[in-house]
Image (cartoon, grey):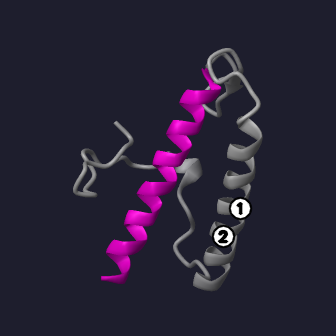
Amino acid sequence: LMQPLPDGKLSKKMKAPAKAQPVQALNAVAVKIEFRIHQEKLIQLLQNAHFANWQKQRIPTSLSKWISLRLGDTLRFFVAHEYRHLLQMQRILQ
């Protein structure tokens, strides 16, 4: 659902929840810096996750305190989510 098709296109557009939508006037430089910081954190998390059990370790979600995902599913979701952002950036730059 989250992963783009092999040609890089999105199979389904997904609207961000209201609390996750950015304000209209964003500083492009600040956004790039923040995105880069998030990418570095993702790399560090992936490196640390190498030692964890991806099937047993559960991660709480922001959706509800009652919903948690396996570590492997969480990482797959997050990587696909970040890739969608990269595709958005490509579309903006074209």
Circle number at residue 26: none
Is 39 rendered above or below residue 91?
A: above
Residue 33 found in image quarter = bottom right
What is the quadrant of the C terminus in the image?
bottom left
Residue 41 found in image quarter = bottom right
Q: Say if the magenta span includes residue 31.
A: no
Q: Say if the magenta span includes residue 91.
A: yes
Q: Amino acid at mark 1?
A: Glu
Residue at the image point whose x is 28% and y is 58% from the top: 8
Q: Residue furthest front?
A: 51
- Helix, strand or loop: magenta stretch: helix
Q: Is residue 82 left or right of residue 90?
A: right
Q: Are marks 2 and 1 in contact (CB under 8 Å)?
A: yes
Pick the front one: 11 or 72 = 72
Residue at the image point whose x is 52% and y is 47% from the top: 79
Residue tagged 2:
36
Q: Which residues are magenta?
A: 69-94
Residue tagged 1:
40
Q: Is residue 77 left or right of residue 91?
A: right
